[in-house]
Amino acid sequence: MAGEPQTDCLFCKIAAGEVPADVLRETETTVAFRDINPQAPTHVLVIPKAHYRDAAALAAAEPALTADILREAGEVAAEEKVVGTGYRIVFNTGSGAGQTVFHAHAHVLGGRGLNWPPG
């Protein structure tokens, strides 16, 4: 069921503390941790603790939780000191867009020039 932890989901396991991660922030509804394959000097993932397959499913089911993720992304950017130089928040939705873990998550990227358009 949407929103319920999935036993085969890496990010559900990280949210539950069953798999180690370099956690920077945690709230009642979200967890923020460093990406293990960073694409920029700052590359942090912000995930909901509830399981939704992708950003579209999350936004349709829980707009307030989607806002929590965006708020936390801003807090991560402030703590990582990339607000002044700029940062990007990216949601990859679907394998064709580069989503490899099918648990909604935002990438917070910064610390270097981020050309547009990406990829």
Image (tube, rainbow, N blue to C red):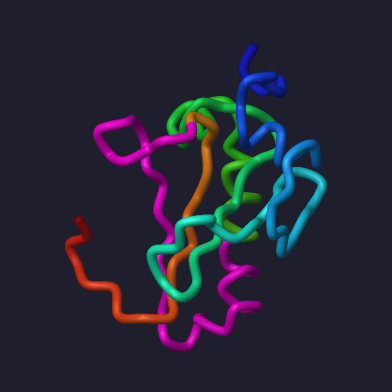
The vertical placement of 41 against 74, above or below, is: below
Position above or below: 89 against 8:
below
- Kindly identify the residue that appears in the image at 48 percent across and 34 percent down: 101
Image location of residue 29, percent across then percent down: 75, 43
Q: Residue 41: x percent and y percent?
A: 46, 75
Give the camera-side residue of 55 and 115: 115
Q: Which residues are magenta?
A: 73-101
Q: Relative to residue 3, is residue 92 drawn left or right? A: left
Residue sticking out furthest to the bottom: 84
Magenta stretch contains residue 62: no
Figure quadrant of the C terminus: bottom left
Q: Residue at x 53, y 57 (%)?
A: 35
Residue at position x 77%, y 55% from top?
A: 26
Residue 78 inside the magenta-drawn segment? yes
How many numbered circles are shown?
0
The quadrant of the image that shows the N terminus is top right
Instruction: Using the rendered view, name the quadrant where residue 14 is placed.
Output: top right
Residue 31 vertical placement versus 82 (above, below): above
Q: Kindly identify the residue that appears in the image at 43 percent across and 31 percent down.
A: 56
Tell which of 83 and 37 is nearer to you. Answer: 37
Q: Nearer the viewer, residue 94 or 100?
A: 100
In the rendered image, residue 55, in percent from the top left (x then y), is placed at 46, 36
Where is residue 5 drawn, in percent x and y? 71, 23
- Most foreground residue, 1 or 11: 11
With 4 as the anchor, is 57 left or right in this view? left
With 43 as the anchor, is 17 left or right in this view? Answer: right
Residue 73, image quadrant: bottom right
